[in-house]
Image (cartoon, rainbow, N blue to C red):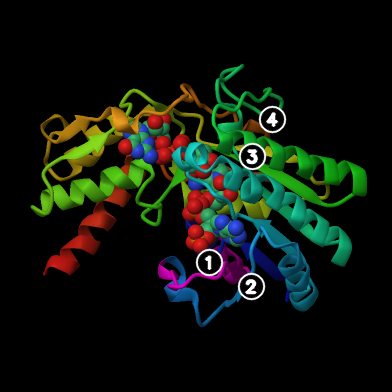
Amino acid sequence: MPTAIIMGITGQDGSYLAELLLSKGYKVVGVARRASTVTYERIEHLLDKISVVQGDLTDQGSLIALLEEHKPTEVYNLAAQSFVPTSWNQPALTGDVTALGVTRLLEAIRYVDPKIRFYQASSSEMFGKVLEVPQRETTPFYPRSPYGVAKVYGHYITVNYRESFNLFAVSGILFNHESPRRGLEFVTRKISDAVAKIKLGLARELRLGNLESQRDWGFAGDYVDAMWRMLQQDQPDNFVIGTGQTHSVQEFCEIAFGRVGLDYKDHVIVDERYYRPAEVDLLISDSSKAGKILGWEPQVEFKQLVEMMVDSDLKRLSAKVA
Ligand code: NAP
Ligand code: F7E
C-alpha cells in the first residue's frame, strides 16, 4: 500500500486530496500544526481513515522526523500562509512558511529518502501583472504580493532540487479553485456565505472590494486529481491547471444572489478597505499541456460551482437556525 504525506491536511485542498488518495488505496498521513483549539472541521468525516500527526513547515526537525517515521512514497506540500491580503500584513511569516518551508521539506526528503516523490502547490499568483495572456508553463512571472513572491521562490527551489539532486519534484501552477470548504475570507466563500445569511434574514449587506477583478475559478475537487496525476508520470515537470475561462467578482455575485432570487445590487456595498495595494488583473490559464500529458480536464463549470457553494451554505445555515 503506498503511503502519502499531506502537509496542510486541515486546509481546503488537503481534505479533497485525502479523499481522493483513500479512494485509490493509499495510506494517508496528514500533517497539522499544533493549535490550542483543534480545527479538523474539513476532515472530521475522515478521521477514522487517516492518521493526523503534528508538524510545522517552520521546523526542520519535525519534517525529518515525519519522513523517518512514516516512510512515505509521495509528499504533497499544500501547506502555506495562503491568504494574499495577510501576506502584506505578515510578509516575513509568509516568506518563512510559504517560501523557506518548501526548502525545509525538500531538504528533509534529500536527507531521509531522495526517492520520495514531491508535489509543490504553486500558484497563478506568480503570474501577477501578467506578461502573457493566457498564462502557461513558459510565461514569465511578475508576482504582485508577498504571497506571490514567496510562491515564486517555492516554485524555483522545487525546480532547482529536481535539477541539482535529481529529485522527483513537481510544481503544479494552479489557478484559483474553490468549493464549499473554501476558507470564509476568500471572496467566493465570503459571497456564498453572505448570500445564505441574507436569504435567511441573518444579515442585510455584503461589503466587498474590487468587483471588476477577474479570476479563472475552478472546483477544488477537480484540481486535487491533477496533483495526483503529476506524481504518476515518468518524469517530473511543471503543469498549469485551470479552466481557461475568466469571470469577474461581479459575475460571481450575480449568479450567487440570483440562485436565491435576490439582486446583488440591493445588498453589495463596495468598501475600499478590501482593495489591495497591488492587484492581479487578468488571470486566465492555458492548461493544454496538462490536458495532453496528464489527460486532465476540469469537470465542474463556473455556474455549477457558484450554485454548489450557495446551496451548501444555505443548507448549513438553515440547519443552524432551525
Ligand atoms: P488553505 O485552505 O489556506 O490551507 C493551508 C494549509 O496550510 C492549512 O492546513 C494550514 O493549517 C496549513 N499551514 C499553514 N501554515 C503552516 C505551517 N507553518 N506548517 C504547517 N502547515 C501550515 O489553502 P488551500 O486553498 O487548501 O490551498 C492549498 C495550497 O495550494 C496552498 O499552498 C495554497 O497557497 C496553494 N494554492 C491554492 C490555490 C487556491 O485557489 N485554493 C491556488 C493555487 C495555489 P491551519 O489549518 O492550521 O491554518
Ligand atoms: O480574491 C477580489 C480580490 O482572496 C480574489 C488564494 O487561494 O487564489 C487565491 O488568492 C479576487 C481579488 O483570492 C474582495 O481583490 C473583491 O482580486 O478570493 P481571493 P486570491 O487573492 O485570488 C490564488 C491562486 C492563491 O494561490 C491564493 O492562495 O477577489 N475581492 N472583494 C475580494 N477578495 C477578498 N478576499 N475579499 C473581498 O471582500
Q: Nearer the viewer, mark 2 or mark 1?
A: 2
Q: Earlier in the sequence, mark 4 or mark 2?
A: 2
Write the residue at 78% across / 58% down. Answer: 117
Secondary structure found at label 2:
strand
The residue at which mark 2 appears reads as: 29
The residue at which mark 1 appears reads as: 19
Q: Quadrant of residue 214?
A: top left
Rendered location of residue 111, percent (x, y): 88, 63
Q: Residue type at mark 4: give it.
A: Glu
Where residue 137 is drawn, which disc sits there?
4
Secondary structure found at label 1:
helix
Image quadrant containing the N terminus: bottom right
Q: Earlier in the sequence, mark 4 or mark 1?
A: 1
Q: CA distance from mark 2 to mark 1?
A: 12 Å
Rendered location of residue 52, percent (x, y): 58, 75
- Left or right: 57 as drawn, with respect to 283: right
Q: Nearer the viewer, mark 4 or mark 2?
A: 2
- Left or right: 67 as drawn, with respect to 23: right
User: In the rendered structure, which segment of residues is drawn in magenta?
Assistant: 17-41
Q: Residue type at mark 3: give it.
A: Lys
Rendered location of residue 178, percent (x, y): 43, 47
Where residue 151 is drawn, which disc sits there?
3
Q: Is residue 169 above or below residue 69?
A: above
Q: Is mark 3 within 8 Å of ligand 1?
A: yes
Q: Earlier in the sequence, mark 2 or mark 3?
A: 2
Q: CA distance from mark 3 to mark 1?
A: 25 Å
Q: Quadrant of residue 180?
A: bottom left
**How many C-alpha atoms fall within 10 Å of the one at disc 4: few (<14), some, or many (≥20)?**
some
